[in-house]
Image: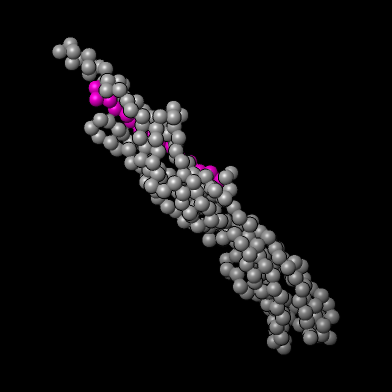
Amino acid sequence: MSFSIRLAEDMISVEAGVTVPLGVEIANRDEDQDRYEMEIEGLDPEWTAVPVPTFTVSARENHTEKVFFKPGRVSESVAGNYPFVIRVRSLENGEVRTAQCVLNIKPYHHLSMEVNPKKGMVSPFKQLNDFSVTVVNLGNTEHTIQLYGNDPDDECAFEFEHEQINLAPGQQRAVNVRVTPGKGSLVSSTRLHGFSLSGRSIENPAIVCSTQAQIEQRPILAPSTLVAFLIF
């Protein structure tokens, strides 16, 4: 065996968007110096960097080079373990040595939520109280989302098309929700109810997202209209 390789670690952990190095030691057992070529196999090339792909090692010497790993902070960098191989080839005699390692990408969480329209309306003659809420999983782990709604005065009822949805990393989903305020008086002022729609991860309850909207509740007659009618 004219040379051997050894990795500083068998597993390296990295947060998406952060660079982590790995030392690779090459031991030249020959009586002559040799030139080597190094590459990483089994990972997305955008996650890796080999600053010095070719180098020289003197006879009977040990030499260490570093390779770097930086998976992007995007949903495509799914959390989990990724086995890979460091491959080193002698440019003098063509001999190849390999070493196995595992890249562990840590999870990160980011949920986003939007509602459309931002304002609805309910009256005795017309109802525009159907909303569409879109939830986006911008993290790199899968989540089951529990959906719910609330308003400060606790006067609205919320009816979701689906109360739970499953979102893979990078996935988004739209869910219809009907918001119904409590019964109003036949003669009263127009009321505006502010409410929020929220989602909470069942796997990790600390991960939440929310959005806000309004619904206008109109009576049959406003007090001013009734007074004008009576005067007339």
Figure check: 120 above or below 143: above
Total numbered labels placed on residues in the image = 0
Figure check: 156 above or below 169: above
Q: Quadrant of residue 156?
A: top left
Residue 31 appears anywhere in the view: yes
Q: How is the image coloured?
A: one colour
Q: Quadrant of residue 56?
A: bottom right
Question: Percent position (x, y) of residue 161?
Answer: 38, 47
Work out whether residue 18 or residue 108 is closer to the camera in this orientation and state it: 108
Question: Percent position (x, y) of residue 195?
Answer: 42, 34
- What is the magenta range? 207-221
| Residue 206 counted in the magenta span | no
Q: Which residue is at 22% across, 14% downward? A: 227
Q: Residue furthest top?
A: 231
| Residue 219 counted in the magenta span | yes
Quarter that holds the N terminus: bottom right
Q: Which residue is at 33% across, 28% downward? A: 183
Question: Percent position (x, y) of residue 212?
Answer: 43, 37
Q: Which residue is at 46% across, 49% downward? A: 164
Question: Percent position (x, y) of residue 173?
Answer: 42, 52
Q: Residue furthest left?
A: 232
Q: Main secondary structure of the magenta part?
A: strand
Figure check: 4 above or below 177: below
Residue 19 appears anywhere in the view: no
Q: Quadrant of residue 185?
A: top left
Quarter that holds the C terminus: top left
* Left or right: 69, with 169 as reference point: right
